[in-house]
């Protein structure tokens, strides 16, 4: 068996196991990690000149952010204004990623990655409370 194929299969099984056992809070963390991973991979694809792969990976990151956005629930929030701010932030990130995809701009990808890191650090801090 091809070692890379075996590694990918292991990662897929491991991911499915993490998801099936994860709390809703952990699922958000996994989505944020997935978005960051896709954007890092997109930057690598762009550096290699693999534009098709870059497009695919940025689209996956947009899909993840869209999923995060759709999961926002103002009715369950202690502060609905926070939900509105997150919704606007996710909308901004997606718009910037569309721009990065069109212009092949790694600085925009970096900007969105930093925003995701900031959101993720907030989620990570909640987990420790």
Image: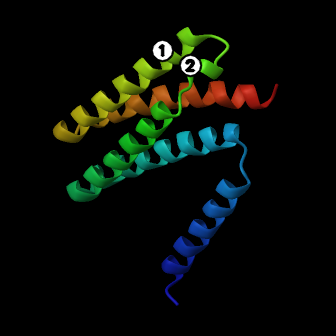
Of residues 27 and 99, which is closer to you in this image?
27
Q: Does 78 appear above or below 100?
A: above
Which mark is drawn over residue 74? Answer: 2
User: Quick check: can you spot residue 111?
Assistant: no
Image quarter of residue 93: top left
Q: Residue at x 63, y 44 (%)?
A: 27
Foreground residue among 11 and 45: 11
Percent of width and height locating residue 68: 50, 35
Which residue bears the numbered disc 1? 84
Can you say whether 20 is above or below 65 in the image?
Answer: below
Mark 1 lies on a secondary structure that is helix
Quarter holding the C terminus? top right
Q: What is the secondary structure assignment of the residue under circle 2?
A: helix
Horizontal and vertical percent position of residue 48: 27, 57
Mark 1 closeness class: few <14, some 14–19, many ≥20 residues within 10 Å? some
Q: Residue at x 61, y 72 (%)?
A: 10
The tag on residue 2 is none
Q: Residue furthest left?
A: 103
Mark 1 and mark 2 residues within 8 Å of each other at the beta carbon: yes
Does residue 65 show up? yes
Which of the two labelled residues, at mark 1 and mark 2, occupies the earlier sequence position? 2
Q: Position of residue 19 (x, y in %)?
A: 65, 54
The local crowd at label 2, few if under 14, some if 14 to 19, many if 20 or more residues have their Cα within 10 Å, is few
- Seen as rendered, the residue at the extreme bottom is 1
Percent of width and height locating residue 30: 60, 45
Give me the residue at 80% from left, 29% from top.
Answer: 128
Question: In the rendered view, does 41 fall on the left or right side of 5?
Answer: left
The alpha-carbon separation of the residues under discs 1 and 2 comes to 8 Å
Q: Nearer the viewer, residue 44 or 14?
A: 14
| Image height of 107 relative to 57, above or below | above
Image point (35%, 23%), residue name: 92
């Amino acid at each position: 068996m091809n070692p890379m194929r075996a590694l990918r299969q292991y990662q897929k099984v491991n991911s499915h196991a993490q998801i099936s056992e994860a709390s809703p809070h952990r699922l958000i963390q996994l989505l944020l990690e997935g978005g960051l991973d896709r954007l890092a991979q997109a930057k690598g694809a762009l550096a290699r000149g693999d534009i098709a792969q870059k497009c695919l990976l940025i689209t996956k990151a947009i899909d993840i952010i869209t999923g995060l956005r759709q999961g926002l629930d103002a009715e369950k929030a202690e502060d609905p204004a926070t939900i509105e701010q997150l919704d606007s932030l996710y909308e901004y990130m997606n718009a910037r990623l569309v721009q990065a995809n069109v212009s092949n701009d790694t600085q925009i990808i970096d900007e969105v990655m930093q925003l995701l890191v900031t959101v993720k650090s907030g989620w990570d801090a909640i987990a420790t409370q």
